[in-house]
Image: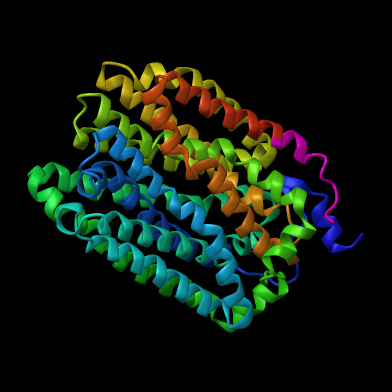
Amino acid sequence: MSRAAEQATTGLDDAPETDDFEVSPGKIAFPVVMGRTSEFFDFFVYGIASVLVFPYLFFPDSDPVQATLKSFAIFSLAFIARPIGSLVFMAVDRNFSRAAKLIGALFLLCGSTMAIAFLPSYAQVGMLAPVLLAVFRFGQGLGWGGAWDGLPSLLSLSAPAERRGWYAMMPQLGAAIGFMLACGFFFVFVRALSPEDFMAWGWRFPFFVALALNVVALFARLRLVITPEFVRLFNERELQPRRVFETIRTHPRQVFVGALIPLATYAMFHLVTIFPLSWATLFTDHDASDFLGSLFLGSIVGGFGIILSGLLADRLGRRMQLAIAAVLIALFSFVAAPLLGSDTTAGRTTYVVLGFALLGLSLGQASNAIASRFESIYRYTGAAVTSDIAWLLGAGFAPLVALWLCSEFGLAYVGYYLLSGAVVTLAALAFSRTLQTVR
């Protein structure tokens, strides 16, 4: 059996992926985590501001719920732009170099994030303010799509067969750390400043911090991407860019199923981070800074959940681990509304902490479940494209849909929405067993 065919039959656990060249996975892990931390910090700084700041600065003529819905609509633009960013920057990768792609994408991501910090308000320039916000949010999405460097796949391929789950979860730690940092900054500024000072300048500071984080992450990743040793590793592992439409055309089932497998994870992603903050500030008397404190605690628990996912995946197999997480998310959907809608702070905090634990357990293996659907020659592009589609379907509109559902029909419908994601994930995991060959 050929190497490609042998890899294709392994499915989500993709065991036979070794060769004679040895590299320490630990050497790859740090820049991978740093890169994901900077990307998710940018992501969550915007997400928190889309609840606490943007509805009031850019849509002051709408009532708070409608203003937040408009803010969430702009929030979704990055997920629409992300596949376009992958398409553009994959071409840069093919025609120039991976370093050129990474530098261009991260400068676009960082520059768009920084530009948001300088935006005028609606009161100053009228409709130009939300238009500029939408433009730079779209720019964030383009940069996010191009920031894929292949290092997580290289980390997984270089890990010992019995530790693949452990090393696969490491990039996802960047999500927990990035949210922790973003949440911490907003917690300090909301708590320390008057509402007037926070809305005037305090909210802008976390966007400036993104510059420092992105610079550190860029150099940490370039240190590996451009060295001859790792260029040779990428070549030997066949982690080279292919044309996006060629990848989709030759692997339609892998792309389709791979995009559906993490649906519960990515829906959960925003239903325990961005959406509950909007619910608490719009429909309860829960102080924003106190709820940010609950979210900060939840991010710590989520980090431990990600670590646990690595241990379980190595012990049970990735498919089983993801199935267990999806079942637990389905069960959580039945108690989500009573907990979040509770009149007590303890109930809402329980929602956040329990939700983050399940998010971490699911998120830790979701990304590599996508990558493992492709043989090595298509893995670099396949993982990026499929991940873009998965984020768009699962997370892109989740805050907007969840807030609209609860405002129109009640909080219980948010639980039904989450349950539908878990059902789709379980169905995709079951169907993935039938994908025994790659066309």
Compared with residue 31, is residue 349 higher up or lower down, i.e. above or below?
A: above
Q: Residue at x 49, y 43 (%)?
A: 395
Q: Residue at x 51, y 53 (%)?
A: 80
Image location (x, y in percent) of residue 322:
62, 36
Q: Residue at x 40, y 19 (%)?
A: 410
Q: Residue furthest right?
A: 1
Which is more toward the observer, 299 or 311?
A: 299
Answer with left or right where residue 311 lies relative to residue 347: right
Image location (x, y in percent) of residue 236:
72, 74
Q: Residue at x 62, y 51 (%)?
A: 368
Which is more toward the observer, 416 or 182?
A: 416
Compared with residue 308, is residue 93 higher up or lower down, i.e. above or below?
A: below
Which is more toward the observer, 129 or 144?
A: 129
Which is more toward the observer, 141 or 366?
A: 141
> Which quadrant, please, contains the C terminus?
bottom right
Image location (x, y in percent) of residue 112:
35, 65
Number of numbered discs visible in the structure rendering: 0
Image location (x, y in percent) of residue 113:
33, 62
> Which quadrant, please, contains the N terminus?
bottom right
Compared with residue 115, is residue 160 higher up or lower down, i.e. above or below?
A: above
Magenta region includes residue 429: yes
Q: Which contiguous range is marked in magenta?
A: 428-439
Judge whether residue 30 can be spotted in this image: no
Magenta region includes residue 75: no
What's the colour scheme? rainbow
Judge whether residue 22 can be spotted in this image: yes
Answer with left or right where residue 235 lies relative to residue 135: right
